[in-house]
Image (cartoon, helix red, strand yellow):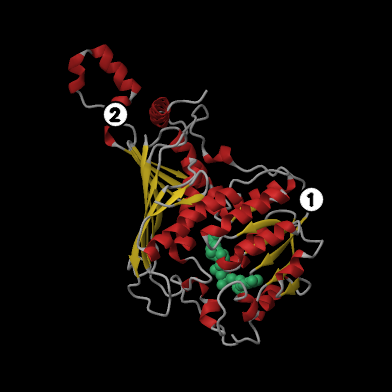
């Protein structure tokens, strides 16, 4: 039977006090009778035979595509057979890394036409995600597509339609969704650990040129080594510009700015943890403060998002901030705040902080109080711990591995993935609308259930 929030909050507190007693008695934290599962119980099952080989191809062999492929190849029974990229240097790197027998091409349709490929990883710049995803599913391939799922809000429905029509497994690459940290946060929120959710926030602080998208440009970059015409074939025609190719994140024709690059990860995690489908009002502010290198996107961005009450959660507000001129470089966090505490969430750790005043809910204390009569209320009480840190077990392979493993498991078992096209669109849309709000200088309204923008 589903517990009401108040009941589940009490049961969480009961577990917490039981646990405190267990610790005092020398037994392990959150012993087996606890509903708050230790990470050991959340270990992944293999669920398939290792002979069941899946052949993959990589489309877009830059930084993330290479990383995704390295992780994918750690999943037993996965083999890389082909790589597509528009720059010779990346194709040469792929052969050096994965062997000269890998098939390489600059034409992604040559990958899709091959019968020996079961699944593709799409890690091109954002403006190619939709078209290659749709073409790949129609060519019978399962798709792991990097985030954000699409480059513009209008592009989402086509991906959802292709997934429905083809029945292929389609997963977006926000790895946090599959991590132990997100799972634990989901369980804790459900068990009432922070009371009623009312606020969430996320933050990124960066400062170093490489972190803020000033990537090195290879010396041999030219139209001889780069297929520039294909690169811009689905967007505005321009003369070759190596910055627009190698530093694509800074330009709106190809990238989606801070919101599409970073906020989207937090929408994915937040929606997974809370069961939310998304916000209904989006407002952004920011500016270009420092990196005047020709970029078209802000280097400081603030977004506020209103989440309405649903069956899954109460109404709450979300605040996301990103600063590329921040001297505290390296800080990134996601925090959920409730009426009784808060959670700081990473992929392998959750730090739960509880209000000091929850002692009055301690069943031991309440029982003593009842038995002792009113005078007992003057007495100081035993308080449960104010902070509990849940850390992943040593040897945990991490969210990226779990995410790839979930993708291949779904292919092998004809199963489902959490971060499918609908989930991916609901995470991408508020990020893209955040950009629209910034450029239009006005709030944007979104119906997260119907996945439609709303005119007011
Ligand atoms: N999940 C994450 O944590 C994460 C992290 C970084 C990047 N990403 C995403 O991964 C994608 C790639 O980012 P990156 O940092 O690897 O960029 P990158 O520039 O390092 O790599 C992109 C590659 O795509 C190639 N390319 C461009 N258009 C192509 C096309 N039409 N066909 C084939 N290849 C094409 C480029 O030549 C380049 O090698 C982006 O969508 C980004 O948002 C996700």
Q: Crowding near pointer 2: few (<14 within 10 Å), some, many (20+)?
A: some
Task: Identify whether 114 is placed above or below 319.
Answer: below
Q: Quadrant of ligand 1?
A: bottom right
Q: Position of residue 69 (x, y in %)?
A: 65, 63
The CA distance from mark 1 to mark 2 is 54 Å
Q: Is residue 338 left or right of residue 218?
A: left
Closer to us: 90 or 171 = 171
Is residue 88 positioned above or below 264 on the image? below
Circle 2 residue: 359
Instruction: Locate residue 105, reporting x and y percent.
Output: 73, 74
Q: Residue at x 52, y 42 (%)?
A: 183
Q: Residue at x 35, y 72 (%)?
A: 288
Q: Which residue is mark 1?
A: 52
Within 10 Å of disc 1 (Cα), the crowding (few <14, some 14-19, many 20+) is few
Coordinates of residue 142 in the picture (x, y in percent)? 71, 55
Q: Position of residue 18 (x, y in %)?
A: 41, 26
Tell me the SS state at disc 2.
Answer: helix
């Amino acid at each position: 039977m589903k517990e009401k929030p108040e009941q589940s909050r009490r049961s969480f507190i009961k577990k917490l006090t039981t646990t405190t007693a267990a610790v005092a008695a020398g037994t392990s934290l959150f012993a087996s009778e606890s509903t708050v599962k230790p990470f050991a119980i959340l270990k992944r099952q293999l669920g398939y035979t290792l002979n069941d080989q899946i052949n993959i191809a990589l489309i877009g062999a830059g930084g993330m595509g290479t990383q995704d492929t390295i992780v994918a190849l750690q999943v037993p029974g996965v083999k890389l057979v082909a790589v597509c990229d528009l720059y010779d240097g990346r194709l040469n790197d792929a052969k050096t890394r994965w062997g000269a027998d890998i098939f390489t091409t600059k034409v992604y349709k040559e990958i899709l036409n091959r019968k020996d490929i079961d699944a593709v990883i799409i890690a091109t710049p954002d403006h190619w995600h939709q078209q290659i995803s749709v073409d790949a599913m129609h060519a019978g391939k399962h798709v792991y597509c990097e985030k954000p799922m699409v480059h513009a809000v209008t592009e989402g429905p086509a991906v959802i339609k292709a997934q429905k029509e083809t029945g292929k497994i389609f997963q977006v690459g926000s790895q946090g969704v599959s991590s132990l940290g997100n799972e634990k946060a989901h369980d804790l929120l459900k068990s009432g650990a922070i009371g009623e959710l009312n606020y969430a926030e996320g933050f990124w602080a960066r400062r170093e040129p490489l972190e803020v998208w000033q990537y090195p440009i290879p010396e041999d970059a030219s139209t001889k080594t780069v297929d520039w015409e294909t690169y811009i074939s689905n967007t505005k025609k321009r003369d070759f510009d190596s910055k627009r190719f190698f530093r694509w994140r800074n330009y709106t024709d190809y990238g989606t700015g801070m919101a599409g690059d970073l906020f989207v990860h937090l929408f994915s995690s937040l929606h997974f943890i809370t069961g939310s489908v998304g916000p209904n009002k989006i407002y952004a502010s920011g500016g270009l403060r420092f990196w005047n290198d020709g970029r078209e996107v802000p280097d400081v961005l603030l977004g506020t998002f209103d989440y309405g009450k649903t069956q899954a959660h109460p109404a709450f507000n979300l605040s996301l901030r990103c600063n590329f001129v921040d001297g505290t470089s390296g800080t990134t966090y996601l925090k959920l705040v409730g009426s009784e505490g808060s959670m700081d969430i990473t992929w392998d750790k959750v730090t739960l902080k509880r209000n000091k005043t929850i002692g009055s809910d301690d069943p031991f204390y309440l029982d003593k109080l009842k038995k002792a009569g009113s005078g007992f209320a003057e007495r100081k009480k035993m308080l449960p711990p104010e902070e509990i840190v849940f850390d992943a077990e040593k040897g945990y392979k991490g969210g990226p591995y779990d995410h790839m493993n979930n993708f291949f498991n779904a292919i092998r078992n004809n199963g489902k993935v959490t971060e499918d096209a609908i989930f991916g669109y609901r995470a991408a849309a508020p990020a893209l609308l955040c950009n629209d709000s910034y450029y239009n200088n006005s709030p944007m309204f979104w119906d997260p259930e119907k996945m439609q923008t709303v005119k007011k």
